[in-house]
Amino acid sequence: MPKIKAEKKSRIHNEVAKQGIQFNKDFGQHILKNPLIITSMLDKAGLRPTDVALEIGPGTGNMTIKMLDRVKKVVACEIDTRLVAELQKRVQGTPYQAKLQIIVGDVLKTELPFFDICVANIPYQISSPLVFKLLLHRPFFRCAVLMFQKEFAQRLVAKPGDKLYCRLSINTQLLARVDMLMKVGKNNFRPPPKVESSVVRIEPRNPPPPINFVEWDGLTRIAFVRKNKTLAAAFKHSTTMAVLEKNYRVHCSLHNKDIPEDFDIKQKVQDILTGAEADQMRARTMDCDDFMKLLHAFNSEGIHFA
């Protein structure tokens, strides 16, 4: 058995070597090679001839070239200079060259330009920070069609009560409508990743909900640390109480409010939870509306999470 595995690995590496590039696993490089899946992703994105499209991690340009056929301009963000050179070589001397802008660098540290739509097979290790970078980007884009690790995609679309429902689910669904589009097997990539993949469509809510996202994130962080526990139990942690008390004292100082000598932050939090009828609720079954009401109840009493 070990010999067969070694031969299989060697065959795959030989195929990659023929392309002149050894893919870097540190960058999560798994090139989408199936043209049918690329076409399907572009179809589901609803590209228009007037669009500026953003692609993250274009690799050798399999999707980029097909996208350049359909849109006004493609902005491709790539961290690997070897692949940048490969992509530039591919469009050199063609009509595509003037329509392609390449940004070299880490997309998480890059200030993104205006774009209408994003279509990408992204490096899986940056999935979560990238989703929120895109959703907090202004001006708004129309939609994003993105390839993720299957379990990450399932978390994005999970509903209250689902096993995979988590802080990622509710934070994403606050800011966007999220739909699962299709599953993609590992053999559609070169080299194949160890996990199955899925394609998700994300449409930002425009206008966004009238809420401070940093505050919202602070509340959901506390509630989902132990999502199966009641909120009354989730808020009893001493570190949480210390942070909330510090924020409350700053709030009172800024608004010239006196704090009673016998002030007890634990009692204050418990009273707010009880008043909002949320003390026995559990994060795993709460939706966006439930958390919005709870955040309003805390904020109106001077308790802030940021």
Image (tube, rainbow, N blue to C red):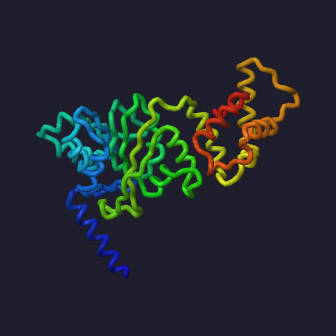
Left-right relation of 239 to 86: right
Q: Nearer the viewer, residue 122 or 107?
A: 122
> How many numbered marks does the figure carry?
0
* Residue 76 spot, x, y in % from top left: 29, 40
* Residue 8 spot, x, y in % from top left: 30, 73
Q: Residue at x 48, y 50 (%)?
A: 157
Q: Residue at x 73, y 29 (%)?
A: 301
Q: Nearer the viewer, residue 24 or 285?
A: 285
* Residue 228 spot, x, y in % from top left: 67, 54
Is residue 221 positioned above or below 305 on the image? Answer: below
Q: Answer with the quarter of the image where residue 55 lies.
A: top left
Figure quadrant of the N terminus? bottom left
Q: Nearer the viewer, residue 2 or 306?
A: 306
Left-right relation of 227 to 197: right
Left-right relation of 282 to 210: right
Residue 78 visible in the picture: no
Q: Residue at x 70, y 53 (%)?
A: 229
Name the residue furthest bottom: 1
